[in-house]
Image (spheres, helix red, strand yellow):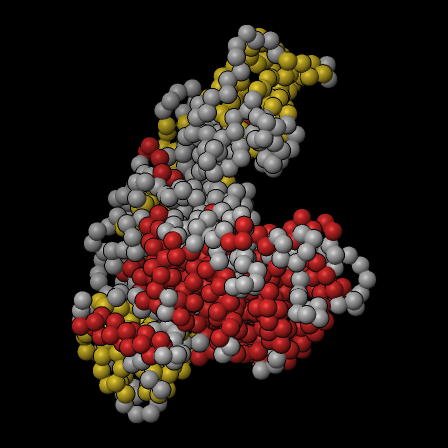
Amino acid sequence: MSRATLAASLLLAAAATACDNGAARDYPVQPVPFTQVRFEDAFWAPRLETNRTVTIPHVFRMSEETGRVDNFSLAAGLIEGQQCGDYPFDDTDVYKAIEGASYSLMLRRDPALEAYLDSVIALIAAAQESDGYLYSARTNDAEELRNWFGEERWVNLERSHELYNAGHLYEAAAAHYQATGKRSLLDVALKNADLIDRTFGPGKLRKPPGHEVIEMGLVRLYRVTGERRYLDLAKFFIDVRGRPLDGRTLGGEYNQDHKPVVEQTEAVGHAVRAAYLYAGVADVAALTGERAYVRAVDRIWEDVVGRKLYVTGGIGATGGNEGFSEPYLLPNMSAYNETCASIANIFWNHRMFLLHGDARYVDVLERTLYNALLSGISLEGDLFFYPNPLESVGQHRRTPWFGCACCTGNVTRFIASVAGYVYAVARTDLYVNLYAGSRAEVDVAGRGVRIHQETRYPWAGDVAIAVEPQAGPQRFTLHLRIPGWAQHTPVPSDLYRYLDETPAGAPTLSVNGEPVAVRLQAGYATIDRTWRSGDTVRLDLPMPVRRVAALDSVESDRGRVALQRGPIVYAVEWPDEPGGHVRNLLLPDEAALDAAFEPDLLRGVTVVRGAARAYRRVPGSDTLAATDVPLTAIPYYAWAHRGPGEMAVWLAREEAAVRPLGYPTLASRSTVSASFGPNPGAVHDQMEPRYSIDHDVPFYHWWPHKGTTEWIQYDFPDATEVSTVEVYWFDDTGIGECRVPASWRVLYLENGEWKPVWTEQAYGVDKDAWNRVVFETVRTRAVRLEVRSQEGWAGGIHEWRVG
Ligand SMILES: [Zn+2]
């Protein structure tokens, strides 16, 4: 243990003793509130302005158009009608937008926006039932949503989201109170929290929420009011999770309700729920000193960062559970990476940093921030991604809204408060976690210090930091984060590594022109001195383009390379490559890569340029042909702004990993139609799976139709003779509900009638293989596969050849 760590732990021990005597306890490191930091740069400042002028009004307008605001008016008895929307948690979209708008008001006064909030809050207050219950779907007796919330309050917590709605209400209320000093929404929140406090707890109802967030929300109410019972209630909801009390059936891994939280070791289930829980556990740990909580989130964090984190910082690999999957299962095209999960991951990693004071958590935070999270919102601020995949053939595009609109309001509140991640303080330690052109007023040991950062980050790594103590010379330690990307560790685990062992140049540091040695302490270069007005620190973080490889256990990335420069992860997108193809590219390890800032592209981005090889199959043989092509990569967050098409983050670096273009076949020239389901075209895209569960190439399925007979059909350009079909079944045993079929057969069209082909061969249902059937030649304009799914399961197809 170094002297510094020893000193830190003694401090913590002293704090613990004090707390046991009833004194207030909190995170050992405290964030500098976002209201103290003002961006003056070309990257964040415009985004905050777009959030204020475009995204926040957009989310409110959509909330009105979709009936989300009317649902409150209806519950208040102010209008007649029916509950709108498909989900009982639609109330939270309004809450989150209020939270975002409140943060925005803290940055810039806006009387019109404030008045609008007053009007919406008045409706919410009127919608609250007399005892504090607030949940528009039940008050409005929304019959079609009853399967979510059941006959009585709290009987169906696993699905009802009653406590989830409450949690977002509390966060919004605390934000609005802090922004405006008005108690209008806070009083609504406290009345609701008091009802929940009367209802839940030891000797009362002992059940956890199905979707976490109330834990963080109650902590917010505790911080605002100082009422200990809100903190106790947050702790209760954590402790009751995973325990089958009062005969309750556990909810299972999907909502982290499979075992007590303090015994959990791995990240499981729905990723937003999970990371909200872990963030809430960190909060309660900081405020109560519960060491078992810290040990639990430490273990789970190691699991995520070591085995379940995308190179973009996204979490939650699979769509079926919107969540975590098996270790190292990180498919790229079907990557879920919900935008809300990125926000939750940032909340959680920020709290881990505040607990431990270690830069590695900020490394994860920064990776998620600049990549997975920013991908979720368009540059214009009014289009959103719900999942954020790392590869596409054009099937993904941002949209203005979703039926389940959780991500949209979440973006408003996150972007408005992003400046809160830049600085933190602990006694006489000042942490600089993020670099951005900005001015800040920071309080260090009770004295004001002005900080002025000048930098072109994230496009350039040189940062000038002027330090101005306001009350005369002041001694404290400045901690400058030296990001993992400026060293040898893309993430604080062995999950990813840089292929260049010796990056060009190490970080350098100077104070008033005098070089200072960079000595790392928990990931920070530290400067302990008496600071005087006019002191300037210069930090230079060289930003070469770096190649990233994943651990071999990540099969989806095997033989592949991703590009990163500074905190930005890159993607290759169709408009920049010949023919619009990028998935067939191979980037040789020895190919030189350069970076150039393009002020007019995608609102100003640094692109990466080099040379690659484009592969295609040679007709009639097993060989591949390759041609040299120029390569241009753009920041991943900026993809999907130039129309739909191919995109890839991971490019082949070995020929075995190449996905060559096909050549036209009868199947690829056919028109596809099917009995049900989106994207039947996946079956003739000539992207061959490696096995039936392969999520790195598109597939087609009939889910959620189970045990049914379905069809898929090729219409040929002309009448054609055919005598074989080959089918590669999609089967996601272990993570989904698709299985190889019970049976199938081939039909052909003759005189407007579908007839079975004649064959003595068996119709194969093998997994991980082509199932080939040869039949008596027919001349036809169309063939069909008629497929009967297994009882209780759905069916799907990866690829279908015909000849
Ligand atoms: Zn979401």
Which of the 4 quarters of the picture holds residue 15?
bottom left
Q: Which residue is at the front of the view, 606 or 410? A: 410
Above or below 176: residue 657: above
Q: x and y percent of residue 751 in the render?
A: 72, 14
Count of numbered circles on the image: 0
Above or below 165: residue 314: above
511 left or right, relative to 314: left
- Outermost residue toward the right in this view: 80
Q: Residue at x 66, y 30 (%)?
A: 675
Q: x and y percent of residue 42 in the render?
A: 45, 69
Q: Residue at x 41, y 71 (%)?
A: 287
Q: Quadrant of the N terminus?
A: bottom left
Q: Which residue is at the front of the view, 328 or 333? A: 328
Q: Residue at x 30, y 56 (%)?
A: 492
Q: Residue at x 54, y 63 (%)?
A: 203
Residue 156 visible somewhere in the drawing: yes
Above or below 199: residue 488: above
Q: x and y percent of residue 585 in the render?
A: 38, 39
540 left or right, relative to 747: left
Residue 672 visible somewhere in the drawing: no
725 left or right, relative to 713: left
Q: x and y percent of residue 283 in the render?
A: 43, 67
